[in-house]
Each structure stands twice: as C-alpha cells, then as structure tokens.
Image (tube, helix red, strand yellow):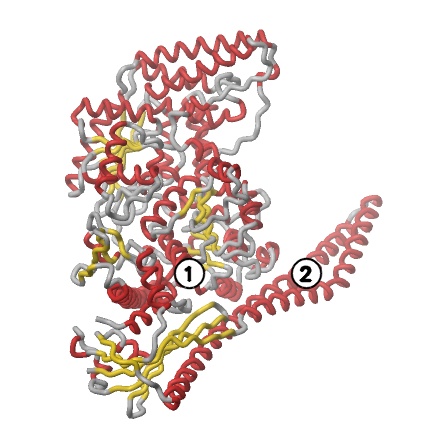
Amino acid sequence: MITSYQSKYFAYELTKQNASNSIGRLSQSLINATVDLNPHQVEAALFAFRAPLERGAILADEVGLGKTIEAGLIISQLWAERKRNILIIVPPPLRKQWHQELWEKFYIPSIILESKNFNEMVRSGHRNPFLQQDQIVITSYPYARNKADMIRKVNWNLIVFDEAHRMRNVYKKSNKIARTLREATAGYPKILLTATPLQNSLMELYGLISFIDPHIFGDETTFRRQFSRGTKEMSEMDFIDLKQRIKPVCHRTLRRQVTEYVNYTQRIPITQEFMPTNEEWELYEKVSAYLQREHLFALPASQRALMTLVVRKLLASSSFAISDTLLSLIKRLEQLLEQLDSGKTEITVEHSDVYADVDEFDDTVEEWEEDDQPSYIDKLSPDEMKRLIQEEKEELEQYYSLAKSIKENSKAEALLIALEKGFEKLRMLGANEKAVIFTESRRTQMYLREFLERNGYAGKIVLFNGENQDEQAKQIYEQWLEKHRHDDKITGSKTADMRAALVEYFKEQASIMIATESASEGINLQFCSLVVNYDLPWNPQRIEQRIGRCHRYGQKHDVVVINFLNCKNEADKKVDEILSEKFRLFEGVFGSSDEVLGSLESGVDFEKRIQQIYQTCRTAEEIEQAFKNLQAELDEQIQLKMKETRMHLLENFDDEVREKLRDHYHQTSLHLNRMERYLWNLSKYEGAREAIFDDETLSFVKDYETYQMISQAKKQNSPNVHHFRFSHPLAQKWIEQAKSRELLPKEITFRYSDYKGKVSILERLIGKEGWLSLDLLHVQSLESEQHLIFSAIDTEGGQLDQEMCEKMFELPAVEGEEVEISDSIRNTLRRISEGQQEAILNEIMERASAYLDSELEKLEKWSQDLKNKLEKDIDEMTVEIEHLKREAKLTRNLAEKLEKNKQIKELEKKRNEMRRNLYDQQDEIDEQKDRLFEEVEKKLEQRTATEHLFTIKWRIV
C-alpha cells in the first residue's frame, strides 16, 4: 500500500545517475544481473567508473575471479544509461562465450561480427555494420584489425579488450594487430581484461597503460631509461613513482583475497594409454610420411601448413575421420586431372570438403595467418603434372582402402575403460555421473555414439556440434521450445536456443555429451565433472577453454580430466609431457597458471611449432631433440623473473583488500535489497490494474504469464517464469509511467503502525505532521550525476534530514485531499533545498579539485619525462663525443684519425643544434601540457539544473 508520490520517488531513485564513488553507480546493473555477484567484482567495476571511464582501466584480477562479469557489470550499467555503442574485442574462441554470457547474466543482446554477416549487411545497404542499434558488437582481434577503418568511424561509449595481454607488446613495431587497434580505438574509453599485465618486462606494462592513457608516461625511450633498466637498478623513489602512476588505471585482486566468497575445486588428471593395432599404426605411418613431403597436389599451397594440421588431427582422431578425408583429397586430385584434360592451365579447385569434418575451422583460419607460397604446380609441364597427380591419387587410394578395412579403433576400446575409471572417481567425489567427451571430428563423433550405444550406453548420449542437425537434436529442440514457451529462456535465435536445449537435455537426461570443438566455447557445464579429451588440441588455450566449460564458477565438485596417449607415438608422448608438466593444464585448482598460459601471446604460435616438429622430424632422436629445443624456448618465455615486481607494483596488502571487500559486500547487499524493494513496490502500484501480485513469492501474473523478481527466480530456479528485473520492458513501462505523472500537493498519511519493522529515527515523529518537497538536482562536471533532495519540516519548524525522509517514504501510506501551500512554507522548503544543493555541489567541487590535482601532477610528470629525454639525449651524445676523442687520440693511423675527427665535428655540430633547440622544444612540451590541462578544466566546468518533482503535507500515524 503506497501512493503515487512514493511510486514517483522510487522511479527516480531507480533511474538516477549516481556518482562513481558510491555503490549506487552500479544500481541498474546490480538489479539486472542473474548471477550472484561477489564483492571483488563490484569493486572492480566501481574502480573502472572512477578511472574515469573517459579513458578506461586495466582490470587484472587473477584467473578464476570472473573478469567477464566485472566487464559485464560496467557494460550493463552503460546499457541502462542508454550508452549503447559498445565493442568487445576477443580471441576468436571466446566470441560465443561473451555472446551467451551477456544475455544469460545481464539480458543484453549482442551480435558477433565476422566476414559472412558483415558482408551480408554491406550488401543489404548497411554502410557500417559496426554501428548497431541496441545490440553490442563482439568481434575477434584479427577481424578487428582487418576492419580497423570501420571501427574508427563509430563514436564508441566503451571498447572492451579481453585477454588484453595480446596488446602488451604494442610498443614493438612487429606487433601489427596491437598497433593498428591502438590507432583505431584512440580517444575512446577502454577496459582491458588480463590476468597477466606484466610477464617478462616492465615495457609490457608501459604498452598496456599507453593503450589506456598516452600521458601517464613520456615516450618509450624515457620509460626504458627511468623504469625498465631492471628492478634491481631502479631506485626506491622511481619504484614509488611508478606505482603511483599505475594506481589510478590498474586494478588487481588475488584469489587468496576472496576465499571468503569464492569456493574453488581441483582438477584431477587421468592418462588413458592405448596401443594401436598393426593396421592402425601402418595407416598412421604412411599418411604421416605422405604429409611430410615437400610437394603435394592434394593440399593447396596457399594453406599448406593449416591443411596439413587438419589432416594430422583427423588422422589421430579415428580411421573413420581420416578415411573420409582421404576420399575428399582423392576427389580433389580427380578434379585437377579433369581440369588439365579440358586444357585449363590455372588450377582452381575448392578444398572445403577436406575440412568439412572439423568444427570451428573458420576460427582456425582466422588465427593462422600464412604467407603465400609459390606454387610448385606453376613450374611443371601439363604432362608431367598429370603423371605426378595420377601417382599421388593411386597412393591415396591405397591409404583409403587401408582405412576402410579398419572396423574398430583401439582408442575407442580404451574409451570404455576410461569412462569406467572416470565414473568410479565421480562416485567417490559424490558428483553426477556425467561426462563430456571432446573430439575434433564430426565423423569420429558419429562413430563414438554408435560404438558407445553398442557397449552399454544406449539412450544415454547426446551430440553437440557446429550444425546440430541430427534427428535427436531436432526432437530435443522441439521439446525444449514447448517446455519453455512461457518463460524467458527462448531467445529467438535458433542457434542459441538449440545449444541451450542440448545443454539442458544433457543436464537433466543424458549421461554423456559427445562434443566437437564448438562446445569448447559459450556453454556452461558446471553440473558435469568429467572432461574426456578423446582428441587433444595442441593449442593450450583451447584445452583450457574445454576444461573451463566444467571447471568454472558454480562447480561443486573436483573435475576429472582424462587424456588419451598413443603408446607407439613418440611425438604424442612429448606433446602430452609439455602440456601436463609445462602448462600444468590438467591438475590443481586453476589448471594453467597466469604465468604459464599468459606467457603465450597466442596459443596458435605454440600449435604451429608442434606442427612444424611433426612435419620435419622423422626419427625418435630428431623428435627428442626438437622437443628439447621447444622446452628450452618455453622455459625462457615462462620465466617468473617479473613475479616479484608484479607483486610489489600491482598488488595490495591482503588484510586491506579483505576489509574493503567485506565493506563492499555489506554495502552492496543493503543497496540491492533497497533497490529491489523500490522496484517491487513501484510495480505493484503501477501495475495494480494489469496484474495480480504475490508478496510471498515476489511474483505476479499478467495475461496468464508469470513473472518473478530476479532475486527470487535465481534462488528457486522456477520453470515457466519470466525473470522480472529493472531492464524488463514491463518494468521500464511502469517506471516511465511513474516518472511522467504530474502530482499536485496532497496530504499523505504514512502508517507506521502498519509497517512490519522498527525504524527508530521515525518513532519520535509519530503523531506529528508537516511539509515535504522533493527536487532532482542535475550536475554535469567531472561526470554526469543526479541527486534527489528532500526538504522537510514539521509544524513546529523542526527540520527532517534526508535519511528520515527516505525512511518515511518506505512506510505504507494513503493519499488524502489536495492541499494549498502557503508562500512562507514554499520559501522555507526552497531555502532548505538550496542549502542541501550547495553542500552537494561543494562535495562535487572537492572531488573535481582532487581529480584536477591528480591530472596536473600526471601531466607535469609526463612533460618532465619528455624534457628529461631531450637533456639525456644531449648527455648521451656528449659521452659519445668524448669516447671518439679518446679513440682519435690513441690511434696512430692518420686516415683513421682524420675520419674520427670528422665524426667528432659532425656530432658536435648536431649537439650544438640540439642545445639551441632544447628550450624551444621544452616550451613546445609545456604548451602541449597546458593545452591538455585546459581540456581537463573545460570538462570540470560545473553545470547544474534543478527539477521540482512534488510537494506534500505529511502525517505519520
């Protein structure tokens, strides 16, 4: 029982823009999130808003702390504020995961931009597909680089870089993607997400920070001289200076600091060895030797390395996968022969059939950039070409016959033993007996289903791949649509809904999901605790992706990881050794550590090195030596020399962090409860004629559909219920309805006697009455913020403070008759409001002043860095001149002496010119600094406006 006045107040409380120094800055995103938020995630999001967001921040929490959720909170808040030009740039395997998590956790729609749909949009008349209406754009690093010109043309509210350590070497000229993206995104707010902002050199930190704000440090040379000589050579003052400069833009939380809120589980590895049959090994050896040849007609020269990788993976997967692939290669050679017979000199044969068996192949192509190789074909006569193609074709036909003759695979037999072991371990752990089996081939996937169904698992299996077009998948999808036709789970995207339907079927009915690489991203399987890598990728980041489907937030049990090992294959053994021992992917709490996985800018580079070994090494000794060399390189990459530096630079004292997080946890809970109460009470009032509300379950029925407050729906996991939240269209409609209502002065009776609770500060007001007005103050300064200001007095002239008024408006109340307000009462209320406004503006001015001081200090340091560089350049040239003079004095050869003296004169001339220009250049730096500071001052100019919302006569009974 509330009034239209309370409803209007609640509506403004729910939508007002708060300052970034309070939990309220995240109001809308907090009451939209379907996931339980941890305090460190709220703290990280608030840090980004304080940064300020016009430039951005680096969120560098350790692995496993939910940086995606932190970014999601920021995105969700901007979305609620209708700042919706948002771009997310991620490694290709993470695109679907972001797409799904934005919708599942925050109800934010997004689109993945890639070549196919980008070109379709352009053809249909869309001038720039990166400019989307009401959906967030997700794209990959390679594609963003490719379309940098298009990205530059959009006025972005925010750009998020996931796995941003790819950008840390932006200062190197060789890092073309990073440099292109820095230029394309210059001037836009950015959030960089990385668990490893600092790996091998402080220059990496310089690279990331210059991405966010180019004026924190001078240029690359000055940074190297001052900070990157090595931590032992850096003075204590320089170290403190470096830490202070980093602090406003880089935030890091450690796992050990959040154990109060986050429960972690282990990974338990099992290696299942198998011995191939003589026929299987013969097939492997022959096809492997074939792939090692320098020249092949069946594989196109333009993508030779990648296509070889694909064929190798299928060869290791199953005889069924490789047999169909061999048939595709044979057909390709037949097409080549047909083209030659018809007199064509230019060979143009599609090779899509070769990789049709591999899911997510387009992602792999995008990551595998290959230089064009000169084609061997061009050097041959047509007759010679025909002869060689015919020979290669006959050879492949022999391999194909051999592959077809193999009816069962020894690895599949070993899978039965592995599943038995795995399920036994799950029973010991008390986990659900569910397993996800990953394979890199759809044909292997089909074979495994048939094999397992013949061996005791009939009716217990579901498939998951890039197409999901089998009869079982279609049936599951139809049943899922029927089951969820009355709730929010149906998105309208058939691909997304099909994936959701298959995951739900696996959770509720099947015991085993056999999945291709398409399941390694964008689906959450935390209800499953057994991951079987039937085929193991060579890219460690892809393996981490797979295991991360199960070993993630919400996993209640330890996760068992089973890998297969071919006992006859020396190279396979070495790969397994590196992935297990160097990358530590399969055991421990987090699998691969920050230091190890973060040391690779791209797992594709590692994958290419492995591929190179398989291609070039033939004997056991060659394989042994090649892997030793690779291990040595990895040791150098994974060196932990910067661990201590990172600890001192980026990490805060544990007790200090824990205390802050406890405070955030308490504040967030209070604020969230308050905002949810406001939304619920407003909805009951505004929707009273449209819906039937139930306070017990926080749900209502409208047009035969059930809606439930998102906090309750999360707890109860109720089926066939729509999640009611701030961003829901109904909520938005009712909020706007309440805000737009014109309210004349009335008498409002607040009924303390009907309130289910005790509010001490209101007890002394029982039986009293008075006047109250509510104003909305808009302030534009350092940031845009709004403040709701209550001005209230009782009939005896006593003034009520803001907290009293807020508490009063939470009491049950009834509206009375309209009332007249005297001029003296109006003037009194206005004076109180003006006094409060002045206090708020002074507080904002203090914040702006502190920000101005920090910006001035930053720019002073930046300009001093550049000035020091000029002087240091002159000093270094003086040292060089003195060195040449000593050499000239010591040399006895006249020609050399003359040459040295000539060099000395040239350098002295250059130094004199530098000295003459020094003051002019220093003046230029000061002018640039002043211009930058003037821009900051303009942003801080205070603009205010006040909007009167209503005035009432109040009474408490």
Nearest to the eye among marks 2 and 1: give it. Answer: 1
Three-letter code, disc 2: Leu
- Residue 377 percent across, percent down from the top left: 57, 16
Three-letter code, disc 1: Glu
**Residue with the mark numbered 2:** 870
Decide: few, some or many residues near mark 2? Use Cα within 10 Å; few <14, some 14-19, many ≥20.
some
Q: Specify whether 121 is left or right of 265.
A: right
Q: Specify whether 719 is left or right of 820.
A: left
Quadrant in which the C terminus appears: bottom left
SS class of the residue under badge 2? helix
In the image shown, does 868 or 466 lie closer to the viewer? 466
Task: Say if 400 sits above or below 737 in the image.
Answer: above
Q: Which numbered tag is attached to residue 523? A: none
Q: Specify whether 108 is left or right of 915.
A: left
Task: Say if 957 sits above or below 76 in the image.
Answer: below
Quadrant in which the N terminus appears: bottom left
The answer to whether residue 669 shows anywhere in this view is: no
In the image shown, does 833 or 353 lie closer to the viewer? 833
Task: Of the two numbered discs 2 and 1 on the same chain, state the one appearing first in sequence.
Answer: 1
x 53%, y 17%: residue: 295
In the image shown, does 720 or 309 lie closer to the viewer? 720
- Residue 489 percent across, percent down from the top left: 28, 46
x 49%, y 40%: residue: 121
x 16%, y 73%: residue: 756
**Residue with the mark numbered 1:** 81
The answer to whether residue 6 shows anywhere in this view is: yes
Q: Specify whether 811 is left or right of 94.
A: left
SS class of the residue under badge 1? loop
- Residue 251 percent across, percent down from the top left: 42, 59
In the image as oriented, which residue stretches furthest toward the bottom? Answer: 796
